[in-house]
Amino acid sequence: MPNTDTQTTETASDEFWLDVHQAAAVMGIKRRRMLDYRDKVKSRRVHNPQSGKSFLMFERESVEALRDERALARATPFRPPAPDSDDVVTTVRPNGGAIALPAATLLQAIAAAVQQPPAAPPLGLFLDLDQASVYAGLSRRLLRSMIGTGELPARRDGRAWKIRKSALRAISHQSPEDNRL
């Protein structure tokens, strides 16, 4: 389907043809990724007689059509079938039983599960400096200075600090004159 021809540089300056950098800019992708699309758009190889090198040119219209096609594919959200659909999906359970559900109900449940943002991971026994700052309601700078003076026990994990939640709770239960809260 794509058409690749060899031309000279005089015809390469045509306004209907783009070099790989220009085509990548139109598509909004990196140059290397644009080379992956060379089979999907009309292209031609152009030879420069002065340097002896050849380079790839892409037809502007086909690059813009591919860009619009990719944008449409990304923008089209999943739409489950109408609730009054007669399609039924039968699933077999691991214990040998089977259940029949209307396809619309099943697809709506899947769509709802996919569209929900992932839940935040539960905070563990140790917190990093950012998590500790949020958990204790103190600035990262204050926590770092308390770690430096020994007021807040913490451990190094590579370049990051790990702080026990119990140590943060102990700090928050101290009176204001005992610490810099």
Image: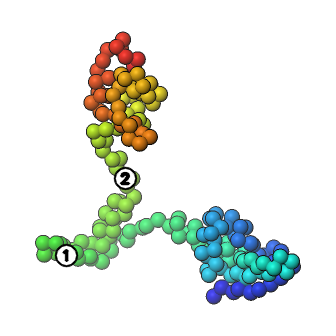
Left or right: 174 as drawn, with respect to 145: left
Q: Work out whether residue 19 can be spotted.
A: yes
Q: Residue at x 52, y 66 (%)?
A: 74
* Marks 2 and 1, how far apart at CA: 28 Å
Q: Nearer the viewer, residue 23 or 153?
A: 153
Q: Residue at x 76, y 76 (%)?
A: 17
Q: As displayed, is residue 19 above or below residue 28?
A: below
> Where is residue 54 shown, x and y percent of the image?
76, 79
Q: Work out whether residue 27 can be spotted.
A: no
Asked if labels 1 and 2 touch by Cβ distance under 8 angstroms, the answer is no
* Tag nearer the camera, 2 or 1: 2
| Label at residue 142 | none
> Where is residue 47 shown, x and y percent of the image?
80, 81
Q: Which residue is mark 1?
A: 92
> Where is residue 61 shown, x and y percent of the image?
71, 76
Q: Residue at x 13, y 75 (%)?
A: 96
Q: Quadrant of the C terminus?
A: top left
